[in-house]
Amino acid sequence: MGQGIPRVTFSCQPGHMLYLHRAFHGIALPASRTPAQTCRSPPGQPATNCSFCPGDCVDESMNLVYDWSTCMGNRSCARTVMQSYIPACPGADKVSDYLQVDYKCLPRAKMINVCNTVQKQMSEGFLMSPNYPGHYPPNKDCLCTLRTNRYKSRLVLSFYDLLLETKGSHCRADWLMLRQNGEKHRHCGAILTGTKTIVSEGNAIGLQFHSDGNDTATQTFQYFTRRLKGFWVHFKAESEDMIQVNCRSLTSADTEVQEIMTDDSNYYRDLGRVPTTPSLHPTLPTTPTDETVTLEGATPPGKGNAGGEYQVEEILVRGNGTKMKTGAENQSGTQPSTNDTPACSISALLLMAVSLYLFS
């Protein structure tokens, strides 16, 4: 770490991958530092203005600048950080006292590649695209079906990470589709951790992954250009029920693929862009590869306390006309903290005051 250039470094043991749950800047408020308050501080250090306390004024808008998604799934990662100006906080001092990052190291062996043949029962787990966090291969069609043992037990899907190619802000290139009750719901573009959770309507849901023949490795989004690394999704049952997981690769002979071939063929035929014969991976007229995708819900850096998160344009192919339930991810877990100002011990930046939670 160079003097005056604060950096944070994350590192997991071999065979594990980073999951960054939440990050925020905070201003320490006197009312939150009374003896009755329990504050989290770096190991072996007393609570100071460099540590988070309940009641502090916090701001997550700088996450768009740091773009923690490039750390997700890797074994290690380093970031240059800075102070944040938080005009909504009370008092004369509007500059942050600390930056806190909550993260876990999860075993890679627990991850399920959606294109592998898998049949197992588990209480919760993780699905990811082939080669995640590297770029996924082209011409892939895969399906994972999740089903709870009890009919009234619903499934909860939390999007940890998603970066999939989109064409013209529509999910017609690469996508992750959720299937339930005759409804098909595509996701593409970018979804950051904590910005999307989906609860199933029933006890079963399918996740179908598709990549076209255009092996595009990067795409320009509203505020950045990023490598298209695929997706990482956590699943569990609301009632802690056991879940039957079935994953496999698909071919053009499978019903699930034939449905998509027909849907896409009809979509492009209406635009006068493809032959009338359905194709699993249609070759389309060239579209600009440097187009900028505007992401819904995005807040430019420094625009107050909005989350600064951005998520995907979604294409809903209606079946029975009902929409899936969506909501914010439950933000729980450890609260390790670090300092980002000269007034606090700079060594905290190296330590990150991290509590590594190994998911077993």
Image (tube, rainbow, N blue to C red):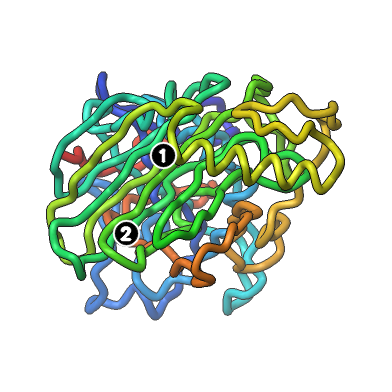
**Does residue 243 appear anywhere in the picture?**
yes
Image position of 265 (left or right of 250): right
Residue 247 point in image, percent of width and height: 30, 34
Q: Amino acid at mark 2?
A: Val
- Location of residue 296 (image quadrant): bottom right
Taking depth in this image into account, of 95 and 183 the one nearest to the observer is 183
- Location of residue 201 (image quadrant): bottom left
The residue positioned 61% from the left and 52% from the top of the image is 312
**Does residue 61 appear anywhere in the picture?**
no
Residue 117 point in image, percent of width and height: 27, 26
Residue 1 point in image, percent of width and height: 50, 26
Outermost residue to the front: 277
Image position of 54 (left or right of 6): left
> Marks 1 and 2, Cα distance to the nearest angstrom?
14 Å
The residue positioned 57% from the left and 41% from the top of the image is 260
Q: Amino acid at mark 1?
A: Trp
**Up/down of 96 relative to 109, above or below:** below
**Up/down of 134 relative to 206, above or below:** above
Q: Quadrant of the C terminus?
A: top left
The residue positioned 60% from the left and 35% from the top of the image is 174
Q: Secondary structure at mark 1?
A: strand
Find out whether the residues at labels 1 and 2 contact each other: C-beta distance under 8 Å: no
Mark 1, residues whose alpha carbon is within 10 Å: few (<14), some, or many (≥20)? many
Q: What residue would you read off at disc 1?
A: 232
Residue 193 point in image, percent of width and height: 46, 50
Number of numbered discs overlaid on the protein picture: 2
Q: What residue would you read off at disc 2?
A: 156
